[in-house]
Amino acid sequence: MMSMLAPVRRDRIIAELPQCFHKEAALHSRSSFHPQVTGACQEQRTGTVGRFKISKIIVVGDLSVGKTCLINRFCKDTFDKNYKATIGVDFEMERFEVLGVPFSLQLWDTAGQERFKCIASTYYRGAQAIVIVFDVNDVASLAHTRQWLADALKENDPSNVILFLVGSKKDLSPPAQYSLIERDAIKVAKEMHAEYWAVSSLTGENVREFFFRVASLTFESSVLAELEKSSARKIGDVVRICSADGDLYLTAQRRKSKCCR
Ligand SMILES: Nc1nc2c(ncn2[C@@H]2O[C@H](COP(=O)(O)OP(=O)(O)OP(=O)(O)O)[C@@H](O)[C@H]2O)c(=O)[nH]1
Ligand SMILES: [Mg+2]
């Protein structure tokens, strides 16, 4: 409990919405946090967010695409060039402060190897975000992302999770080759309603930016869900949270699940 109360690391403080990687495949293209979220944070009306809530993020994808390295680069700032398969699952906690509100992510690193998949999949439930990783140098791993998503969604409510499609090992891909796979990856991301990123855990390129975006969008959707819940309680009716026009995927998903008919 004490550690939960200790101040958040200075390099985990998020005061502005980090931008997306590619405008064509972004969860939304607003340039700042949703005004209702900013307002709620200023007035400390974020409900369970910031006090009790820990958001679960699961990371899935083929074996050896670099899931463990991605998490280790961000959480520990280390990189191991030797492959050690994840057996079952591992997890890391990361504490942030978003718009002045403490916010924790539980990052679940799952096994890509077929023989461990069965154990790993029992940890998929209750995810707020699903990160599907593929290797930008391996088209088959991109093709397999659809199956990984389907498996992860079996254990989760599809209208309540946010999705990220992440191309790894960007350092190994010459620019001309990279831009070819990026075209396909963006197509897949759009189909999935996922936000697309490309990263390198070896060089660290985009790793921090990516996790800041994950934390921010997960935070934003948690606070919006809290606001929706508390106003629904007050009015005793279904309440619509107004969204800016730039909100591409989030509103579409929410509309499917919760909003007025
Ligand atoms: N060059 C380069 N190599 C990477 C990068 N990320 C991971 N690797 C290498 O790819 C191999 C697999 O990385 P892991 O992170 O263990 O892969 P994983 O997805 O966790 O694999 P499983 O746990 O079996 O599912 C290791 O040898 C890493 O060093 C990267 O960004 N660049
Ligand atoms: Mg691993």
Image: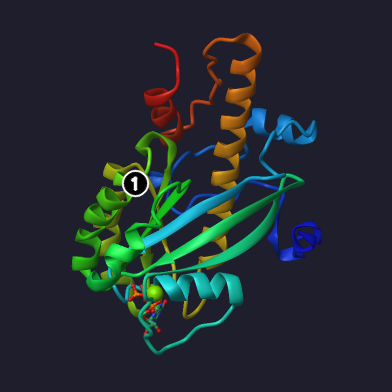
Q: Residue at x 33, y 73 (%)?
A: 65
Q: Quadrant of the N terminus?
A: bottom right
Q: Secondary structure at mark 1?
A: loop
User: How did the renderer colour the structure?
Assistant: rainbow
160 left or right, relative to 78: left
Q: Quadrant of the C terminus?
A: top left
- At a point 34% along the width and 46% down the height, the residue shown is 155
Q: Is residue 85 above or below residue 132?
A: below
Does residue 133 appear in the picture of this structure? no
The residue type indicated by label 1 comes to Glu
- In this rendered view, identify the residue nearer to me: 172 or 91: 91
Task: Please name whichever residue, 178 or 225, is drawn nearer the observer in this view of the structure.
Answer: 225
Q: How many numbered discs?
A: 1
* Residue depicted at x 44% and y 13%: 260
User: Is 86 rendered above or below residue 142?
Assistant: below
User: Residue under circle 1?
Assistant: 155
Query: How far across and how far down the image is residue 102, in percent?
Result: 72, 50
Residue 26 lies, in percent from the top left, at 43, 45
Which of the two residues, 52 or 81, is positioned nearer the viewer here?
52
237 is higher (above) or lower (below) than 72? above
Q: Position of residue 250 (x, y in %)?
A: 45, 34
Which quadrant holds residue 174?
A: bottom left
Instruction: Give the side of residue 8 with respect to residue 241, left or right.
Output: right
Give left or right: position of 177 versus 55: left
| Figure quadrant, ligand 1 | bottom left
- Judge the density around disc 1: few (<14), some (14-19), many (≥20) Cα neighbours within 10 Å: some
